[in-house]
């Protein structure tokens, strides 16, 4: 069997070739990126990856049109997979290692891997309030974005008429300003001498707001309400857009049909519009809840030391305490809880046709 | 037809639907102009007309999606002009079916009964009965997206009929189906209507559909009901040039009155030739004073084509085109005055004298012609004029 014949045999199983090449390259990238290999062995890995690519090109060359067509999807996947391998999987691996590391002596600059499970205990006990606060704030913010975002999306989708695109543009316009700037601006708006507080004072509503736990001691800024409000404001477009997309797909005749079949307008809304908007609400909730739970900007600029979220603690452990192991462990716990929450949520919402 | 004038307690004698001088205006545009007719119990009633003629607006006023600008809509003798759709006992089959995509077939059908809060056991029974009627029992748990167009159509029917409405309103229900399926569904619809004995009000722009299925047809044009009658009525005795041209194909030949009385009349064709017509074949609004402009309608299937001049009245014409149509041959010919006419010759082959450019004689039987008032906007065959066909769609 000569080399070309052998290549042709390989080329007759293009799916395996495509998958094999993808896994090999991705592992190579992770190995290099996460620092499994260094020095001469790194050169060997790089050479092996190069050889794989050369092999792939020759298979595609020998195999002809059919083979190339079968290989195409893997080719299209490759940039994304390699990007994620280098910038997501490789760092993730580093973090796994870091979260189980410790400094053997206080003079070590860099921790080493010691199966240090205590990092996770610290993360879960010492930072328990921050975790609870993060998920609580994120949940309330998600609920608020649904309550504010649904009517907004509804009006744009069903009553927007020819202004639809302009209205959608207005929803997105805040994104033209940096997230940080917008949050800082809210600091000014909610400040003690700012417009909102003075209006509340002017109307004599301070007592009412304090009894609702929105204001604290005459202050609006640096309260939990300000943090939740900031999260709600910053993530609102992520709720409006997916809900709009699912509402926009609803044929208005469906509502006519429901009314024709003896439903009042409100019953038609409940039985037709809401169920058909669920995929949008579902997608929007994920898009809001996940980043909100890990957010630290709003708590930083709109909160106080009693409103720190887990993102702030992770940032603090990483960048100020330089306690990489505990920071990594906290990051993992956050990721784990969010994953579980999303899985449970998916199960309950039962969105078989999530767009 | 039942007698609408008798205000009897016996519900069976009251018309299911009565439109009492109904008008619908949008600003200065008159969508429906003084519609005034009744639809009886168990009737299959079609509203036929080109798009924009007001037929769908009329249907929406019966359903409750639109309110009349003036006049009254009565259901079972009760004025419902301002009653919202969910409180009217009529149901609609929408053009694109409007099935609820997130519900199974069974849940779609159960939607109406559930809105009415019927007993769940009763709902289950009704749904399964209705699935039988539309022959979809095996599809109860499918989603609408998993069904073919014809099946979706039948679900839409079942979803409306399960409520046993006073009348079922169908808005171009077959328009989304392809030709073969459409023809099969016409028969199916007719069968279902006989089975459930509910009044069907059917909106269509397809005259074939209306002629096939309906007991009576209302032909509408520009908001006005031009004529109401049975299929044969409007085909044989159209009340207006619009109806004559819109229903089936017709040769509309301009003529003037030569002489006429109660026994019959004769007319001179514009461009030569004379035709004598029996008394019943002249529309009521034609004034039989000599010189009056009229149109003689001759259906293509009533024109005989012969190579030599026949004994009675006839017109000579030059053949321009011969089209084989399976069961018949369509002959397109040009009269001496340049008017194009068509004739249908039965049989599966053209006689040898039918050749392009040959001169033939067109003749007709005594029952063929029907005379209408005024001259047509386009003289000759309605089927060969592209502009007038497009205007009617």
Image (tube, rainbow, N blue to C red):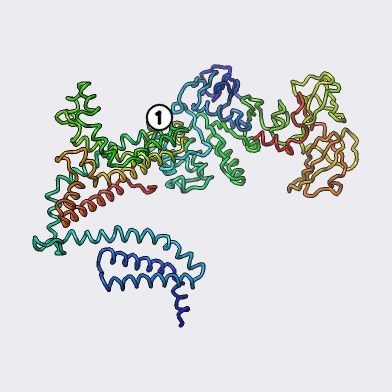
Q: Which residue is mark 1?
A: A265
Q: In front here: A42 or B160?
A: A42
Give the left or right position of residue A247, taking residue A346 as reference: right
Label 1 crowd (10 A; few <14 / some 14-19 / many >=20):
some
Residue B313, given in percent of the width and then of the height, sits at: 87, 32
Q: Name the quarter where the N terminus of chain B is drawn.
A: top right
Q: Which image quarter: residue B359?
A: top right
Residue B184 visible from this viewpoint? yes
Give the left or right position of residue B128, taking residue A307 as reference: right
Residue A275, given in percent of the width and then of the height, sits at: 37, 40
User: Chain under label 1?
Assistant: A
Q: At 77% from the left edge and 41% from the top edge, which residue is drawn?
A: B344
Residue B99, given in percent of the width and then of the height, sits at: 46, 40
Residue B5, given in percent of the width and then of the height, sits at: 58, 17
Image position of B352 with respect to B294: above or below: below
Q: Secondary structure at mark 1?
A: helix
* Numbered-mark total: 1
Image position of A34 with respect to B351: above or below: below
Q: At 79% from the left edge and 32% from the top edge, which residue is drawn?
A: B368
Residue B36 visible from this viewpoint? no
Q: Name the quarter where the C terminus of chain B is drawn.
A: top right
Q: At 37% from the left edge and 37% from the top edge, which residue is drawn?
A: A171
Q: In front here: B162 or B312?
A: B312
Q: Which image quarter: residue A223?
A: top left
């Amino acid at each position: 069997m000569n080399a070309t014949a052998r290549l042709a045999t390989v080329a007759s199983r293009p799916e395996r070739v495509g998958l094999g090449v993808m896994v090999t390259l991705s592992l190579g990238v992770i190995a290099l990126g996460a620092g499994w290999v260094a020095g001469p062995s790194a050169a060997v890995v790089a050479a092996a990856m190069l050889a794989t690519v050369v092999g792939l090109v020759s298979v595609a060359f020998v195999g002809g049109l059919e083979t190339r067509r079968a290989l195409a999807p893997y080719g299209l996947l490759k940039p994304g997979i390699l990007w994620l391998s280098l910038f997501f999987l490789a760092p993730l691996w580093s973090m796994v290692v870091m979260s189980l590391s410790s400094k053997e002596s206080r003079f070590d600059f860099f921790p080493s891997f010691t199966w240090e499970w205590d990092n996770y205990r610290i993360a879960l006990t010492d930072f328990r309030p921050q975790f609870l606060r993060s998920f609580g704030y994120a949940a309330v913010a998600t609920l608020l974005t649904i309550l504010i975002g649904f009517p907004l999306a509804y009006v744009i989708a069903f009553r927007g008429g020819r202004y639809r695109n302009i209205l959608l543009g207005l929803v997105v316009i805040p994104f033209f300003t940096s997230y940080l700037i917008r949050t800082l601006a809210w600091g000014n708006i909610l400040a003690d001498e700012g417009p909102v507080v003075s209006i509340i004072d002017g109307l004599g509503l301070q007592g009412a707001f304090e009894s609702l736990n929105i204001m604290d001691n005459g202050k609006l800024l640096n309260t939990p309400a300000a943090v939740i409000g900031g999260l709600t404001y910053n993530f609102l477009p992520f709720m409006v857009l997916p809900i709009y997309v699912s509402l926009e797909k609803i044929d208005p005749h469906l509502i006519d049909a429901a009314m024709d079949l003896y439903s009042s307008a409100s019953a038609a809304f409940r039985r037709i519009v809401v169920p058909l908007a669920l995929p949008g609400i579902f997608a929007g909730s994920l898009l809001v809840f996940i980043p909100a739970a890990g957010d630290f900007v709003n708590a930083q600029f709109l909160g106080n030391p009693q409103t720190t979220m887990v993102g702030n603690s992770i940032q603090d452990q990483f960048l100020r305490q330089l306690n990489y192991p505990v920071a990594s462990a906290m990051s993992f716990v956050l990721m784990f809880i969010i994953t579980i929450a999303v899985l449970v949520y998916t199960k309950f919402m039962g969105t078989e046709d999530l767009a | 037809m039942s007698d609408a004038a008798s205000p009897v307690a016996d519900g069976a004698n009251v018309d299911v639907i009565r439109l009492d001088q109904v008008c619908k205006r949008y600003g200065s545009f008159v969508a429906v102009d003084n519609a005034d007719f009744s639809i009886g119990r168990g009737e299959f009633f079609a509203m036929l007309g080109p798009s924009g003629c007001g037929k769908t607006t009329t249907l929406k006023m019966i359903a409750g999606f639109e309110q009349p600008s003036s006049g009254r809509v009565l259901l079972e003798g009760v004025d419902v002009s301002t009653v919202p759709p969910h409180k009217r006992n009529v149901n609609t089959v929408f053009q694109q079916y409007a099935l609820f995509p997130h519900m199974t077939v069974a849940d779609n059908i159960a939607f109406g009964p559930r809105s009415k809060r019927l007993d769940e056991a009763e709902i289950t029974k009704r749904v399964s009965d209705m699935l039988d009627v539309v022959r979809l029992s095996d599809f109860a748990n499918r989603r609408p997206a998993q069904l073919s167009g014809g099946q979706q159509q039948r679900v839409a029917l079942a979803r409306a009929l399960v409520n046993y409405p006073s009348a079922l309103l169908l808005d171009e229900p077959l328009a989304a189906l392809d030709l073969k399926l459409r023809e099969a569904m016409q028969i199916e619809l007719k069968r279902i209507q006989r089975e459930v004995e509910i009044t069907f009000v059917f909106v269509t722009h397809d005259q074939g559909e209306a002629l096939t299925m309906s007991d009576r047809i209302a032909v509408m044009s520009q908001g006005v009901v031009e004529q109401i009658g049975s299929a044969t009525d409007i085909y044989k005795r159209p009340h207006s040039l619009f109806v004559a041209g819109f229903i089936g194909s017709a040769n509309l030949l301009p003529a003037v009155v030569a002489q006429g009385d109660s026994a019959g009349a004769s007319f001179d064709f514009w461009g030569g030739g004379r035709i004598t017509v029996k008394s019943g074949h002249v529309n009521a609004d034609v004034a039989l004073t000599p010189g009056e402009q009229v149109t003689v309608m001759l259906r293509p299937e009533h024109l005989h084509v012969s190579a030599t001049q026949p004994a009675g009245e006839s017109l000579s014409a030059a053949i321009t085109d011969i089209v084989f149509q399976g069961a018949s041959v369509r002959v397109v010919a040009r009269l001496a005055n340049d008017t194009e006419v068509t004739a249908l010759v039965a049989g599966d082959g053209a006689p040898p004298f039918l050749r392009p450019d040959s001169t033939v004689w067109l003749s007709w039987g005594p029952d063929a012609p029907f005379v209408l008032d005024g001259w047509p906007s386009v003289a000759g065959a309605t089927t060969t004029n592209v502009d007038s066909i497009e205007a009617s769609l």
